Image (cartoon, helix red, strand yellow):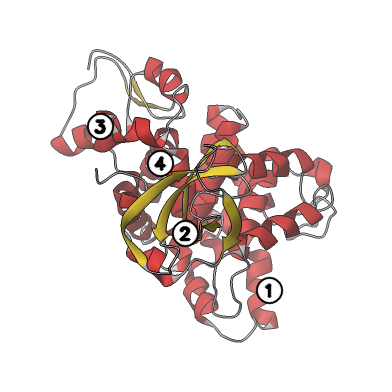
Amino acid sequence: MPYDIEDAYGHLLLSRGARLESEEQRQRLIHIGRKPYNVASRRSQSGGVTKRRNDPAAQFLNPFDELYRISLALQETFKWLGRGKFMRRLDILVSRIGNIIEHDPDASIGAAHLDEEFPYFIRHPLRKALLSDTVAARMEIPDQERRSIVTAALTANIGMIEYQEEFDQQRAPLDEYQWEVVRNHPRRSVERLLAEGMEDRLCLRVVSEHHERLDGSGYPEGLRSRDICRGARLLMISDTYMAMITNRGYKGATAVREALLELLDQSGVKYDRDILSGFINTIGIYPAGSFVSLENGEKGVVIHRGSKGASPVVAAIIKANGQPTTRPLLRDTSIDDVPGVVSLEPTPSVAKRYQLASLWGYDA
């Protein structure tokens, strides 16, 4: 190898002079590795829809295909808890997630809002990781701290992983024993990570504190603002938001607008004001993956937050007459003669029949 290979966080994957040991290793590096100087240059790119459609590198990595593979790999990785290979597998997944977020943050946010193919105990940690790291990147949080936050997002619930499918499918509210499992899961997650050989102290702290709240109302320790690290302050917002907008067995989903308003209502009380502001500025008031109606009666999926937060790029998939379109129609609502967004809407079943990749232009 004539140069060092790093992931999106600057984490060294392969040193200069090292030899590739297998075709599998070569393929892995294609997906998650790059020369160190490429990282900054890629971050400077705008990542717009037109640019992506004409970018051969963008066509090489379809983030939705990669997220599907990551979801499968995460499901398999959890099976290795207590069996010796968990940390190595986890480390590779974190690098792959960083690559997707660097490649297309809008697609990452969109997938977090729309992709429902896997069970909740797989979807939820991956969604938290995607949202948290997209926000952290926009807030210019240092790369190594970002990596710790993503690792924490993926592992924060392993302390109750054996209960999660039961909890998620349950129609009745959780009973007292179940709530005790939930309240203690941050401690148990840390214990399991330590048993697996986790050495990232910041990751362990984020896992431990991600259910604490600034006013002391959280768990398991009831910590207050000055004692809660930045990574946990970010992860608690992503975790709460994604939990609110997701259907569970015992509760329905909260609409995106109402979820954002609920978070804002607790700004400076339960949630860090600056980080919540960064979170909302990143995903926008019309987050990628949300469903909106336009002034001309069309409805569609937001695929890019656009140059103005209130003027996203929309893939219209329902005509004004209520019939589905034959293909997604791009509507850049920041352009004067393009109909603007009227409101957020519940996502109908027709939106979920489209391949997500086609909405974002990755099938072109």
Residue visible at 53% across and 48% down? 339
What residue is shown with label 1? 180
Q: Earlier in the sequence, mark 4 or mark 3?
A: 3
Q: Which amino acid does label 2 sit on?
A: Glu
> At which x and y percent is residue 292?
53, 58
Secondary structure under badge 4?
helix
What residue is shown with label 2? 298
Mark 4 packing: few (<14 Cα in 10 Å), some, or many (20+)?
few
Q: Toward which corner of the image does residue 217 lie, by quadrant?
A: bottom right
**Closer to the camera, 21 or 326?**
326
**Closer to the camera, 8 or 342?**
342
When the figure is inspected, residue 347 is found, relative to residue 83, above or below; the finding is below
Mark 1, mark 3: which one is toward the viewer?
3
Mark 4, mark 3: which one is toward the viewer?
3
Q: What residue type is labelled 4?
A: Asp
When the figure is inspected, residue 53 is found, relative to residue 222, above or below; the finding is above
Mark 4, mark 2: which one is toward the viewer?
2
How many numbered marks have been drawn onto this rendered protein structure?
4
Residue visible at 36% across and 30% down? 51
